[in-house]
Amino acid sequence: MFEVRRAKSEDAAAIWEITRDAFTHYCELAGISDIAALHESEADVRRDIEEKTVLVAYIDDCVVGSLRLTFDDETKTAYLSRFGVRRAYRNNGIGKSLANMADIMAVRRKMKCIRLHTASKVAEIMRFYYSRGYYVESVDSSGEYIRACMRKDYE
């Protein structure tokens, strides 16, 4: 079994590894060569742990998944980023549990919605977000790949 909790500073190295693994795979699926997530350092992750809400899923003290949330209290909008699960642990409900906890935290903070960006042509990712109640709010094709802004409303 796994549990979900807020990340601690000592989780930074594991989160960095998960992010590299998840976004390397994301690039392969999306047919792109590079993405900003692959250029962050362990220090960047540590800073996010201090400045954002970073959640981790872990099994026996081993971090197996993570995501990052920011909350804008003025607009009542949450933003989800750097969502990833170690390849060996995928399709076991870890991503769903992390997403559920993100929803719980957003609702507790009285957010109206949560947003994220993802590659619109990767069907498995789009299906995951659709199954969680997200919809495509907009599409941006100005970069190397087409990114969908996904949104989930709480009201």
Image (cartoon, grey):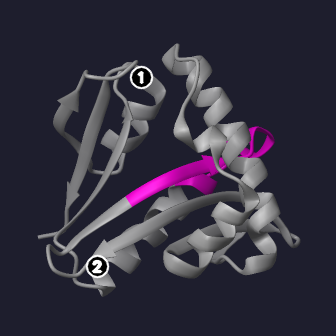
Place of residue 138 in the rendered image (x, y in percent of width and height, measured from the top left): 16, 36
* Figure check: 135 above or below 31: below
Q: What is the quadrant of the N terminus in the image?
A: bottom right
**Amino acid under disc 1:** Ala
Mark 1 lies on a secondary structure that is: helix
Q: Give the residue drawn at x 75%, y 67%.
A: 12
Closest to the observer, 77 or 35: 35
Q: Is residue 135 above or below residue 24?
A: below
Q: Is residue 61 magenta?
A: no
Marks 1 and 2 sit apart, C-alpha to C-alpha, by 27 Å
Mark 1 neighbour density, 10 Å: few (under 14) some (14–19) many (20 or more)? few
- The residue to which callout 2 is attached is 107
Instruction: Tell me if I can see residue 61 in this picture.
Output: yes
Task: Name which residue lies at 32% across and 30% down.
Answer: 147
* Residue 32 in the image, given as x and y percentages of width and height: 52, 17
Q: Which quarter of the figure is the C terminus placed in?
A: bottom left
Instruction: Say if the magenta span includes residue 90.
Output: yes
**Element at badge 2?**
helix
Which dot marks residue 123?
A: 1
Which range of residues does the magenta coloring cover? 80-95
User: Residue 72, image x and y in percent?
Assistant: 26, 75
Q: Quadrant of residue 111?
A: bottom left
Most foreground residue, 23 or 132 = 23
